[in-house]
Amino acid sequence: MRDEDIDWQIYHRIALGEAGTIPELISITELDEEVIRASVQRLVGYLLIRQEGELLRPMGLEEMLLSCRIRYTKDLPVTIENGVIKIRSDHHH
């Protein structure tokens, strides 16, 4: 199975509320833990889901857009870490 197919399957399980942790994803999808962990990391990187400790949850549209804007706007004085908006420490006025 291609990474894209795995990511789509994992994302939908999380978005539909069928699974909210990696162990739940393992039991539902019957995929290997390493495969699921790699997919979760890609989905976090794509700003589609958030990982808070063991919990996985889909990002809402506004959260996705804000996260995307913060990530790609280099001169913005804020960043998001673990879902918390913080002032960039490397930002100079």
Image (spheres, grey):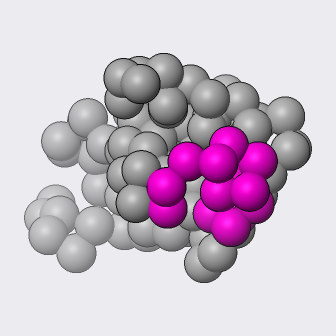
- Give the residues drawn in magenta, as a range: 21-33
Quadrant position of the C terminus in the picture: bottom left
* Residue 75 magenta-highlighted: no
3 and 82: which is toward the camera: 3
Point out residue 18 in the picture as x, y percentages from the top left corner. 86, 44
Residue at x 61% of width, y 38% of height = 10
Quadrant position of the N terminus in the picture: top left
Residue at x 51% of width, y 68% of height = 82
Picture layout, residue 9 above or below residue 21: above
Point out residue 81 in the picture as x, y percentages from the top left corner. 43, 67
80 and 43: which is toward the camera: 43
Most frequent secondary structure within the magenta stretch: helix
Residue, far right:
17
* Residue 25 magenta-highlighted: yes
Asked whether, in this view, residue 74 is left or right of residue 16, the answer is left
Point out residue 45 in the picture as x, y percentages from the top left corner. 37, 44
Q: Is residue 69 visible?
A: yes
88 and 31: which is toward the camera: 31
Residue at x 63% of width, y 63% of height = 22
Asked whether, in this view, residue 49 is left or right of residue 45, the answer is right
